[in-house]
Amino acid sequence: MPVLFGAGAAVWDAVCAIADALTEVPWTIVGGQMVYLLGVEYGAAAHRVTTDIDAAVDLRAAPDGVNDLVAVLTALDFESAGPSPDGHAYRFERHTLGGVAAVDLVPDEEDDQVLVVDVLAPEGLGTRADLSRAFPAKGISQALARTELLPIRVAAKVHWVPRPSLLGAIVSKATALAVDTKDTERHRLDLAFLCGLIADPFALAAEVKKKDRDRLRQASQAFSRSDPLWRAAASPTDAQLALEILIGEAPAG
C-alpha cells in the first residue's frame, strides 16, 4: 500500500482491523475502497478517494455475519448512524482527525473527519433474513462469489483483505450504475477506471455469465465513445474496447 496519512490512513487502518477480526466470516470490501485497492494492485494511479467503507457480508453462508461485523465495528468505536428511511440501520460512523491521503487523488466532496462503514448484504434473501442492520444490494452476490484474499502490507504487518476479483468489481460497479440514480457519475468514473485495468479482455470475457453480460450491456449504454469520463482509464480506447469485448460487442478485426 502507498504511505497514507490522515483520513486515508484511518480508513485503511479500519479496513485492516476489520479484516483481522473477521477471518471466519465470509465478507468482501466493495465500493470506493474496492476500486482504490484494485488500482493499487494493478499499479494504476487512483482517480478519487473516499472515507466510506462498504463491507458486504454473505448472509447465506453466515446468517450471523452482520452481528459479527457490527460487534467488530463497535469494538473499533464506530456507532450506528440510525435507521435509513426504509428501516435499515446499515451505516456506522466514527469521528477521526481530518487529513488527506499522501497520494495524488481527487477527493469526493464529503466530510474527511468522519469514517463511514456501510454494511451490505446480497439481494433476494427473503423475509426471514434479518436486514435491520444491513442494506440488501444488487450485485453483491456475484461480488462475494468472486472474492479473493489479498495480502496488504501496512507498516511492518501483513493483513489479508477480501476483495472481489477485477471482473467481480466491474460487474458490481455496472450493477450500481444501473440501480443507483443518485451517484451515476461516480459509478461511471469507477467503471471506466476498472475497465482500464483489464490486461486480457478475451480471457476475462470467458468468465462472464449471462447475467453479468446483461448488467454490463446496460451500463455501457450510459457512455458515449467521446465521454470524458473514459479518461479515468490509463488508456480510454483500450478501456472502451475491453468493455465491448466483455459484453460480446467488440467490432470484428
Image (cartoon, grey):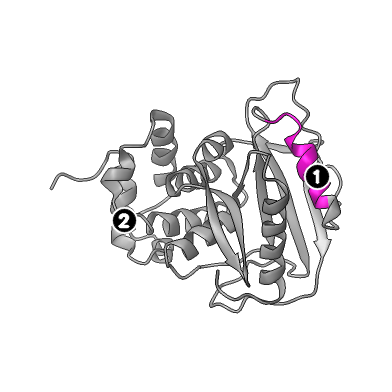
Residue 221 in sight from this viewpoint: no
Estimate the x, y position of residue 128 in percent, counting from the top left: 76, 20
Camera-side residue: 57 or 193? Answer: 57
- Quote the CA–CA distance across marks 1 and 2: 37 Å
In terms of sequence position, does the residue under pointer 1 or pointer 2 come before the other?
1
Residue drawn 28% across the image and 44% down it = 203
Estimate the x, y position of residue 168 in percent, counting from the top left: 47, 43
Confirm whether the magenta stretch covers residue 67.
yes
Q: Which residues are magenta?
A: 62-73
Can you tell which quarter of the image residue 137 is in?
top right
Q: Amino acid at mark 1?
A: Val
Confirm whether the magenta stretch covers residue 87.
no
Kindly identify which numbered label has been placed on residue 248. Answer: none
What's the magenta bit mostly, secondary-structure-wise? Answer: helix
Assign the N terminus to one quadrant of the image: bottom right
Residue drawn 67% across the image and 77% down it = 5
The residue pinned by badge 1 equals 70
Residue 150 in sight from this viewpoint: yes
The residue pinned by badge 2 equals 199
Q: Secondary structure at mark 1?
A: helix
Estimate the x, y position of residue 246 in percent, counting from the top left: 33, 42
* Residue furthest left in the image: 253
